[in-house]
Amino acid sequence: TWDPRWYQAIAAHGYDDAADLSPQLRVLCPDHTQVGCARTPDRHSNLAFFPLFPAAIRMLSSAGIEPLFGALVLATTASLVASALIALIARDVFDERAGVIAVALWGAMPVNVALSSGRPESLFVALAAGSLWLLARHPVWAAVLAALAGLTRFQAIAVIVPVMVAAWVRPNRLTTRLAVTAIAPLGLLAFLG
């Protein structure tokens, strides 16, 4: 339950200012009610957390939805979308039965409790699966989803590189190849920037 509180705090208060970081990558606690500030004068910085999930929580909060509930709704909805996309990929590669089996296996993994706990993992899986499903259909949209995945987790590199490579090995126009190569890494590069 540690990370969901960080994402909710980022959604509510934004990121730490890099200028406030100590050499140990910590920031001072103005009060002990902030996430990570219990019984300590400073805390770890929140700059390591990728921005897409807290930005989505913030959008829901601006519509009047409490951040914890917004995070849970986002995670659960993204998990359902990811399930559908995993089924579509397995169906396209094998058949309908394989789609059902793939979703059942994915959903039964014990670590998947994180998918509905207000963390960005399910959003990442939905974006990654969507990107891979779109790859043969609409490579530029696949690149857009890969870029968004890059704003969710560092592991997006495992989606970004195949999307870029596929754009060049598949029969695409040069403009499509260049667009995919430019778009796919944008999210991760912007975060690491």
Image: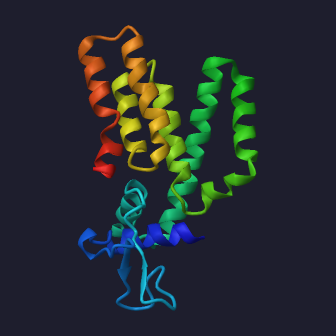
- In the image, what residue occupies the spot 58% across and 55% down? 76
Residue 59 located left or right of residue 69: left
The answer to whether 191 is drawn above or below residue 129 in the figure is: below
**Where is residue 72 drawn, in percent x and y?**
55, 63
The total number of labels drawn is: 0
- In the image, what residue occupies the spot 51% across and 91% down? 39
- In the image, what residue occupies the spot 50% across and 49% down? 123
Residue in the foreground of this view, choosing between 136 and 66: 136
| Furthest-front residue in this view | 23
The answer to whether 79 is drawn above or below residue 97 in the figure is: below
Residue in the foreground of this view, choosing between 48 and 13: 48
Residue 17 located left or right of residue 63: left
- In the image, what residue occupies the spot 27% across and 76% down? 20
**Where is residue 173 drawn, in percent x and y?**
28, 11
Snapshot quadrant of residue 92:
top right
Snapshot quadrant of residue 189:
top left
Q: How is the image coloured?
A: rainbow
> Can I make out residue 147 in this image?
yes
Snapshot quadrant of residue 83:
top right
**Where is residue 181 drawn, in percent x and y?**
31, 26
Residue in the foreground of this view, choosing between 89 and 153: 153
> Can I make out residue 138 in this image?
no
